[in-house]
Amino acid sequence: MKILVATEKPFATVAVNGIKSIIEKAGHSLVLLEKYTDVNQFYQAVADADALIVRSDKVNADVVAAAKQLKIVVRAGAGYDNLDLAACSAKNIVCMNTPGQNSNAVAELAIGMMVYMARNTFQSGTGSELKGKKLGIHAYGNVGRLVALIGKGFGMDVYAFDPFVKPEAINGDGVTAVSTIEELYSTCHYVSLHIPATEQTKNSIGYNLLSKMPKGGCLVNTARKEVINEAELVKVLAERQDLKYVTDVAASNQAELSEKFGTRTFATPKKMGAETAEANVNAGLAAANQIVQYFATGDTKFQVNK
Ligand code: 3PG
Protein backbone atom coordinates (compact mmCIF):
# COMPACT_ATOMS: atom_id res chain seq x y z
CA MET A 1 0.00 0.00 0.00
CA LYS A 2 1.13 3.58 -0.60
CA ILE A 3 1.03 5.69 2.53
CA LEU A 4 1.31 9.44 2.05
CA VAL A 5 2.51 11.75 4.83
CA ALA A 6 1.35 15.25 3.84
CA THR A 7 2.51 17.87 6.30
CA GLU A 8 2.63 21.56 5.51
CA LYS A 9 4.32 21.83 8.93
CA PRO A 10 6.68 18.79 8.84
CA PHE A 11 7.36 16.32 11.62
CA ALA A 12 10.84 16.32 13.16
CA THR A 13 13.28 14.11 11.20
CA VAL A 14 13.41 11.56 14.02
CA ALA A 15 9.64 11.11 13.72
CA VAL A 16 9.73 10.80 9.91
CA ASN A 17 12.42 8.12 10.21
CA GLY A 18 10.29 6.22 12.74
CA ILE A 19 7.18 6.44 10.55
CA LYS A 20 9.16 5.21 7.53
CA SER A 21 10.55 2.26 9.45
CA ILE A 22 7.10 1.15 10.71
CA ILE A 23 5.56 1.45 7.25
CA GLU A 24 8.36 -0.32 5.40
CA LYS A 25 8.65 -3.14 7.96
CA ALA A 26 4.98 -3.87 7.33
CA GLY A 27 5.63 -4.07 3.58
CA HIS A 28 4.12 -0.72 2.61
CA SER A 29 5.77 2.28 0.98
CA LEU A 30 6.04 5.86 2.24
CA VAL A 31 5.64 9.00 0.15
CA LEU A 32 6.52 12.26 1.83
CA LEU A 33 5.02 15.63 0.91
CA GLU A 34 6.39 18.27 3.27
CA LYS A 35 6.13 22.06 3.38
CA TYR A 36 3.87 22.12 0.34
CA THR A 37 2.93 25.62 -0.72
CA ASP A 38 0.25 24.82 -3.26
CA VAL A 39 -2.73 22.60 -2.52
CA ASN A 40 -2.42 21.15 -6.04
CA GLN A 41 0.71 19.36 -4.86
CA PHE A 42 -1.46 17.71 -2.20
CA TYR A 43 -4.17 16.75 -4.73
CA GLN A 44 -1.54 15.20 -6.98
CA ALA A 45 0.21 13.27 -4.21
CA VAL A 46 -3.01 11.91 -2.68
CA ALA A 47 -4.40 10.70 -6.04
CA ASP A 48 -2.97 7.18 -5.75
CA ALA A 49 -2.46 7.00 -1.95
CA ASP A 50 -4.10 4.17 0.00
CA ALA A 51 -3.54 5.85 3.36
CA LEU A 52 -2.82 9.39 4.49
CA ILE A 53 -1.19 10.89 7.59
CA VAL A 54 -1.67 14.63 8.21
CA ARG A 55 -1.28 17.17 11.01
CA SER A 56 -3.46 20.30 10.77
CA ASP A 57 -3.52 19.93 6.97
CA LYS A 58 -7.05 20.33 5.63
CA VAL A 59 -8.52 17.14 4.26
CA ASN A 60 -11.55 18.80 2.72
CA ALA A 61 -13.99 17.63 0.04
CA ASP A 62 -11.54 18.62 -2.73
CA VAL A 63 -8.75 16.50 -1.25
CA VAL A 64 -11.17 13.60 -0.79
CA ALA A 65 -12.34 13.96 -4.41
CA ALA A 66 -8.74 13.93 -5.62
CA ALA A 67 -8.02 10.73 -3.66
CA LYS A 68 -8.97 7.88 -5.94
CA GLN A 69 -8.07 4.92 -3.73
CA LEU A 70 -7.82 6.31 -0.22
CA LYS A 71 -8.97 3.95 2.52
CA ILE A 72 -7.82 5.63 5.73
CA VAL A 73 -6.76 9.08 6.98
CA VAL A 74 -5.04 9.53 10.32
CA ARG A 75 -4.76 12.98 11.83
CA ALA A 76 -1.54 12.70 13.88
CA GLY A 77 -2.86 14.72 16.79
CA ALA A 78 -5.99 15.31 18.82
CA GLY A 79 -8.30 17.79 17.06
CA TYR A 80 -9.75 16.46 13.82
CA ASP A 81 -11.71 19.56 12.81
CA ASN A 82 -9.44 19.68 9.73
CA LEU A 83 -10.97 16.47 8.37
CA ASP A 84 -14.21 16.59 6.38
CA LEU A 85 -15.74 13.53 8.05
CA ALA A 86 -18.88 13.55 5.90
CA ALA A 87 -16.89 13.61 2.65
CA CYS A 88 -14.67 10.78 3.94
CA SER A 89 -17.60 8.69 5.17
CA ALA A 90 -19.35 9.09 1.82
CA LYS A 91 -16.36 7.32 0.23
CA ASN A 92 -16.01 4.79 3.08
CA ILE A 93 -12.70 6.33 4.14
CA VAL A 94 -11.89 5.61 7.77
CA CYS A 95 -10.80 8.68 9.76
CA MET A 96 -8.76 8.43 12.97
CA ASN A 97 -6.88 10.68 15.37
CA THR A 98 -4.12 9.79 17.86
CA PRO A 99 -5.58 11.01 21.16
CA GLY A 100 -3.18 11.83 23.99
CA GLN A 101 0.00 11.45 21.96
CA ASN A 102 0.96 15.13 21.82
CA SER A 103 -0.86 16.25 24.98
CA ASN A 104 2.14 16.82 27.20
CA ALA A 105 3.74 19.20 24.71
CA VAL A 106 0.55 21.29 24.53
CA ALA A 107 0.10 21.25 28.30
CA GLU A 108 3.65 22.45 28.92
CA LEU A 109 3.15 25.29 26.44
CA ALA A 110 -0.11 26.36 28.14
CA ILE A 111 1.69 26.67 31.47
CA GLY A 112 4.66 28.40 29.80
CA MET A 113 2.27 30.96 28.32
CA MET A 114 0.82 31.64 31.77
CA VAL A 115 4.31 32.33 33.13
CA TYR A 116 5.05 34.57 30.13
CA MET A 117 1.92 36.66 30.73
CA ALA A 118 2.41 36.70 34.52
CA ARG A 119 5.91 38.15 33.89
CA ASN A 120 4.66 40.94 31.62
CA THR A 121 5.80 39.17 28.42
CA PHE A 122 9.36 39.46 29.74
CA GLN A 123 9.28 43.28 29.59
CA SER A 124 10.44 45.33 32.55
CA GLY A 125 8.10 45.86 35.50
CA THR A 126 6.89 43.78 38.40
CA GLY A 127 5.20 40.55 37.45
CA SER A 128 3.32 38.00 39.50
CA GLU A 129 3.55 34.29 40.35
CA LEU A 130 1.27 31.43 39.45
CA LYS A 131 1.49 30.00 42.97
CA GLY A 132 -1.72 30.58 44.89
CA LYS A 133 -3.67 31.69 41.80
CA LYS A 134 -6.83 29.93 40.68
CA LEU A 135 -6.47 27.94 37.46
CA GLY A 136 -9.58 26.92 35.53
CA ILE A 137 -9.48 24.03 33.10
CA HIS A 138 -12.17 24.32 30.44
CA ALA A 139 -12.57 20.69 29.29
CA TYR A 140 -10.82 17.93 31.20
CA GLY A 141 -9.49 15.75 28.40
CA ASN A 142 -5.92 14.57 27.89
CA VAL A 143 -4.41 18.06 27.65
CA GLY A 144 -6.67 19.69 30.24
CA ARG A 145 -5.84 17.06 32.84
CA LEU A 146 -2.09 17.49 32.30
CA VAL A 147 -2.37 21.29 32.59
CA ALA A 148 -4.26 20.75 35.85
CA LEU A 149 -1.59 18.45 37.26
CA ILE A 150 1.30 20.72 36.22
CA GLY A 151 -0.61 23.72 37.63
CA LYS A 152 -0.91 21.91 40.94
CA GLY A 153 2.86 21.44 40.87
CA PHE A 154 3.16 25.23 40.64
CA GLY A 155 0.99 25.54 43.74
CA MET A 156 -2.09 26.72 41.85
CA ASP A 157 -5.58 26.07 43.11
CA VAL A 158 -7.14 24.14 40.24
CA TYR A 159 -10.79 23.97 39.09
CA ALA A 160 -12.28 22.24 36.06
CA PHE A 161 -15.49 22.25 34.06
CA ASP A 162 -16.33 19.34 31.78
CA PRO A 163 -19.91 18.09 31.41
CA PHE A 164 -18.61 14.89 29.79
CA VAL A 165 -16.33 13.84 32.68
CA LYS A 166 -17.66 12.55 36.01
CA PRO A 167 -16.99 15.06 38.83
CA GLU A 168 -15.53 12.21 40.93
CA ALA A 169 -12.83 11.63 38.31
CA ILE A 170 -11.86 15.33 38.40
CA ASN A 171 -12.04 15.61 42.18
CA GLY A 172 -9.97 12.41 42.46
CA ASP A 173 -7.05 14.34 40.91
CA GLY A 174 -7.23 16.96 43.67
CA VAL A 175 -8.97 19.33 41.24
CA THR A 176 -12.32 20.93 42.09
CA ALA A 177 -15.05 20.04 39.59
CA VAL A 178 -17.44 22.96 39.06
CA SER A 179 -20.90 22.38 37.69
CA THR A 180 -21.33 25.45 35.50
CA ILE A 181 -19.10 27.14 32.99
CA GLU A 182 -19.99 30.54 34.53
CA GLU A 183 -18.62 29.38 37.87
CA LEU A 184 -15.32 28.39 36.24
CA TYR A 185 -14.82 31.79 34.61
CA SER A 186 -15.97 33.83 37.62
CA THR A 187 -13.66 31.89 39.95
CA CYS A 188 -10.40 31.55 38.04
CA HIS A 189 -7.55 34.01 37.36
CA TYR A 190 -6.28 31.80 34.53
CA VAL A 191 -8.64 29.83 32.31
CA SER A 192 -7.00 27.32 29.99
CA LEU A 193 -9.10 26.28 27.00
CA HIS A 194 -9.15 22.67 25.85
CA ILE A 195 -12.43 22.36 23.97
CA PRO A 196 -12.50 21.09 20.38
CA ALA A 197 -13.83 23.29 17.56
CA THR A 198 -17.31 21.93 16.79
CA GLU A 199 -20.58 23.48 15.64
CA GLN A 200 -21.54 23.73 19.34
CA THR A 201 -18.30 25.33 20.58
CA LYS A 202 -17.45 27.74 17.75
CA ASN A 203 -17.75 31.39 18.91
CA SER A 204 -18.81 30.17 22.35
CA ILE A 205 -16.19 32.02 24.41
CA GLY A 206 -17.08 35.68 24.49
CA TYR A 207 -18.18 38.66 26.51
CA ASN A 208 -20.57 36.83 28.82
CA LEU A 209 -17.88 34.52 30.19
CA LEU A 210 -14.77 36.71 29.97
CA SER A 211 -16.38 39.70 31.70
CA LYS A 212 -16.97 37.45 34.72
CA MET A 213 -13.26 36.72 35.26
CA PRO A 214 -11.65 38.06 38.44
CA LYS A 215 -9.35 41.12 38.33
CA GLY A 216 -6.16 40.38 36.39
CA GLY A 217 -7.77 37.41 34.61
CA CYS A 218 -6.00 35.74 31.70
CA LEU A 219 -7.49 33.48 29.04
CA VAL A 220 -5.04 30.90 27.65
CA ASN A 221 -5.94 29.37 24.29
CA THR A 222 -4.01 26.35 23.07
CA ALA A 223 -7.19 24.93 21.54
CA ARG A 224 -8.62 26.54 18.40
CA LYS A 225 -9.17 30.17 17.41
CA GLU A 226 -12.66 29.34 16.13
CA VAL A 227 -13.99 28.83 19.68
CA ILE A 228 -13.45 32.51 20.48
CA ASN A 229 -15.98 35.20 19.62
CA GLU A 230 -13.30 37.61 18.44
CA ALA A 231 -15.49 40.74 18.28
CA GLU A 232 -16.62 40.16 21.87
CA LEU A 233 -13.02 39.53 22.92
CA VAL A 234 -12.13 43.02 21.65
CA LYS A 235 -15.10 44.50 23.53
CA VAL A 236 -14.22 42.88 26.85
CA LEU A 237 -10.49 43.68 26.60
CA ALA A 238 -11.42 47.32 25.89
CA GLU A 239 -13.77 47.47 28.87
CA ARG A 240 -11.55 45.57 31.28
CA GLN A 241 -8.01 47.01 31.25
CA ASP A 242 -6.86 44.22 33.59
CA LEU A 243 -7.74 41.24 31.36
CA LYS A 244 -5.22 39.39 29.16
CA TYR A 245 -5.42 36.94 26.26
CA VAL A 246 -2.62 34.60 25.22
CA THR A 247 -3.01 32.19 22.35
CA ASP A 248 -1.14 29.56 20.38
CA VAL A 249 -3.46 30.14 17.46
CA ALA A 250 -3.42 33.73 16.28
CA ALA A 251 -6.86 35.31 16.17
CA SER A 252 -8.19 36.42 12.77
CA ASN A 253 -8.02 39.93 14.22
CA GLN A 254 -4.63 39.50 15.93
CA ALA A 255 -3.24 42.70 14.38
CA GLU A 256 -6.17 44.66 15.85
CA LEU A 257 -5.67 42.97 19.25
CA SER A 258 -1.96 43.83 19.30
CA GLU A 259 -2.57 47.40 18.20
CA LYS A 260 -5.32 48.04 20.75
CA PHE A 261 -4.07 46.04 23.71
CA GLY A 262 -0.29 45.76 23.29
CA THR A 263 1.32 43.23 25.62
CA ARG A 264 -2.04 42.30 27.18
CA THR A 265 -2.35 39.92 24.23
CA PHE A 266 0.18 37.58 22.71
CA ALA A 267 0.01 35.03 19.89
CA THR A 268 2.73 32.59 18.85
CA PRO A 269 3.88 33.29 15.27
CA LYS A 270 2.93 29.76 14.23
CA LYS A 271 0.96 27.12 16.13
CA MET A 272 3.58 25.43 18.28
CA GLY A 273 1.76 23.50 21.02
CA ALA A 274 2.65 20.12 19.53
CA GLU A 275 5.96 21.28 18.06
CA THR A 276 8.30 19.09 20.08
CA ALA A 277 10.34 16.15 18.85
CA GLU A 278 8.70 14.01 21.53
CA ALA A 279 5.16 14.90 20.45
CA ASN A 280 6.04 14.40 16.77
CA VAL A 281 7.45 10.96 17.53
CA ASN A 282 4.52 9.95 19.75
CA ALA A 283 1.80 11.15 17.34
CA GLY A 284 3.58 10.27 14.09
CA LEU A 285 4.50 6.73 15.10
CA ALA A 286 1.04 6.14 16.57
CA ALA A 287 -0.49 7.23 13.25
CA ALA A 288 1.78 4.87 11.29
CA ASN A 289 1.04 1.98 13.67
CA GLN A 290 -2.72 2.60 13.47
CA ILE A 291 -2.60 2.43 9.67
CA VAL A 292 -0.49 -0.73 9.66
CA GLN A 293 -2.88 -2.34 12.18
CA TYR A 294 -5.91 -1.28 10.17
CA PHE A 295 -4.58 -2.89 7.01
CA ALA A 296 -3.43 -6.00 8.90
CA THR A 297 -6.42 -6.64 11.16
CA GLY A 298 -9.15 -4.08 10.41
CA ASP A 299 -8.60 -2.46 13.85
CA THR A 300 -10.72 0.72 14.05
CA LYS A 301 -10.23 1.56 17.74
CA PHE A 302 -9.41 5.23 17.08
CA GLN A 303 -11.93 5.78 14.29
CA VAL A 304 -13.79 9.10 14.64
CA ASN A 305 -16.30 8.71 11.80
CA LYS A 306 -17.98 5.47 12.90
C1 3PG B 1 -3.80 18.84 17.83
O1 3PG B 1 -5.01 18.97 17.65
O2 3PG B 1 -3.29 17.71 18.00
C2 3PG B 1 -2.91 20.04 17.95
O3 3PG B 1 -3.60 21.18 17.64
C3 3PG B 1 -1.61 19.92 17.17
O4 3PG B 1 -1.69 20.36 15.84
P1 3PG B 1 -0.43 20.28 14.84
O5 3PG B 1 -0.14 18.86 14.58
O6 3PG B 1 -0.84 21.03 13.62
O7 3PG B 1 0.74 20.95 15.52
Image: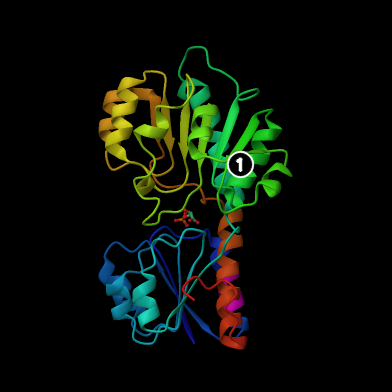
- Front in this rendered view, residue 135 or 220: 135
Residue that appears at 41% across and 39% down: 268
Give the extent of the magenta segment. 18-23
- Front in this rendered view, residue 68 or 230: 230
Which residue is identified by label 1?
A: 147
Amino acid bearing label 1: Val
- Check disc 1: other Cα within 10 Å, few if <14, some if 14-19, many if 20+: many
Majority SS type along the magenta span: helix
Residue that appears at 34% across and 45% down: 203
Q: From what the image shows, is residue 273 above or below residue 87? A: above
Residue 74 place in picture, x, y as percent: 49, 71
Residue 178 visible in image: yes
Q: Is residue 21 magenta?
A: yes
Tell me: 137 left or right of 228.
right
Residue that appears at 61% across and 52% down: 165
Tell me: 210 left or right of 119.
left
- Front in this rendered view, residue 58 or 214: 214
Residue 191 place in picture, x, y as percent: 51, 34
Residue 188 visible in image: no
Which residue reaches farthest front? 179
Residue 132 place in picture, x, y as percent: 65, 22
Q: From what the image shows, is residue 80 above or below residue 66? A: above
Residue that appears at 52% across and 12% down: 126
Which residue reaches farthest top? 125
Q: Is residue 143 magenta?
A: no
Q: How was the colour assigned to the protein in this rendering?
A: rainbow
Q: From what the image shows, is residue 78 above or below residue 259? A: below
Residue 198 place in picture, x, y as percent: 40, 56
Tell me: 52 left or right of 148.
left
Q: From what the image shows, is residue 76 above or below residue 61? A: above
Quarter of the image for residue 43 reads bottom left
On whether ligand 1 comes within 8 Å of the CB at mark 1, the answer is no
